[in-house]
Amino acid sequence: MLKLRDIVAARERLRPWLRPTPLQEAPGLAERVWLKLEYSNPTRSFKLRGALNAMLLLDKPARERGIIACSSGNHAQGVAWAAQLSGGKARLLMPAHTPKSKIEGVRRFGAQAELFGSTYDETEAEARRREREQNLTFISPYNDAGVIAGAGTIGLELLDDLRDLERVLVPVSGGGLISGMGLALRTLRPTLEVIGVCARSAPAMANLFHGSALPQRWDTLAEALSGEVEPDSMTIALVRRFVNRIVLVPEEAIAAAMRWMLLEHGQVVEGGGAVTIAALQCGAVELDGRPTALVISGGNVDEATLRHILG
């Protein structure tokens, strides 16, 4: 089982490459609510934290064999960026619905980008097949101890900046982000409430957490959160241990949250990154006056999507 010391070590490992991301007050939502702006990272997503930590933990033979990863886009960019820094070669598979901005980001960092499959699950199956047949090193977007520890560094930064923090809202897909953050936050401050937010169209972790069987829809503004969770993923046990609850938000609430960030804050946020805002705005999580941080996990959006949400 991953430990707090792994996250602390990840922060030291990443320190030469990454600065803490900004924390911005959001009085337009409520008093004592802050936004943790992960889209300010070089790849406009939190994913590069875990990707770089995992890459730096690999030995030389593993890097030299070549890296393969699958992603709806943000993890792919993180792996491409990490490979460029560490001198590795990365091949990234992404589903056909991946926004063009994310595809271009992968290529900008010098990695090989390939579209495969109509859904994330098809893309992941192909990546794992190539891993076996071509003896490549696979870096999972969530089911990897190094990836989880890297993501958990966000929790340490929040506790550094907000001494009276009482709850945190975190976007959830495969659970890598909330697993690492939950472990860090609730180990250091056990009374703190950690709330996961899934898009209603991407309920995989919510289904596992609640024992429900809600269907998955691939046509969603939160494409970064789509996909099933591997049955043996280490994130499942971590989520059950460190997450207090998981809520769901509908598409219209995600669109409204993206519009709010653009029009009120002048910031472009992708659907998967805006679900925490949506949870407060639509009432999935109540506004109760407690000091609250919302993780805004990414900001890679196509022009077509922006035009759509603006009507």
Image (cartoon, rainbow, N blue to C red):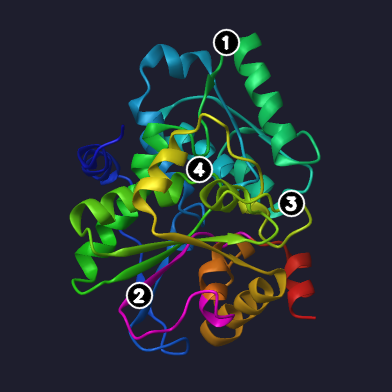
Q: Main secondary structure of the magenta part?
A: loop
User: What's the CA distance linking mark 2 and mark 3?
Assistant: 30 Å
| Closer to viewer: mark 2 or mark 3 | 3
Residue 201 visible in the snapshot:
yes
Q: Which residue is mark 3?
A: 215
Residue visible at 26% across and 55% down in the picture = 186
Q: Is residue 255 above or below residue 224?
A: below
Residue 135: image tag: 1
Q: Is residue 260 magenta?
A: no
Label pair 3/1, CB-CB below 8 angstroms: no
Q: Earlier in the sequence, mark 4 or mark 1?
A: 4
Please name the residue that numbered disc 4 is placed on: 78
Percent position of residue 196, x then y: 47, 59
Identify the image quadrant of residue 156. bottom left
Give the Cα separation between the discs numbered 4 and 1.
Answer: 21 Å
Image: magenta residue range:
280-300
Q: Amino acid at mark 1?
A: Asn
Amino acid type assigned to the residue bearing label 4 in the image: Gly
- Mark 3 or 1 closer to N-term? 1
Secondary structure found at label 4: helix
Label ID, residue 292: 2
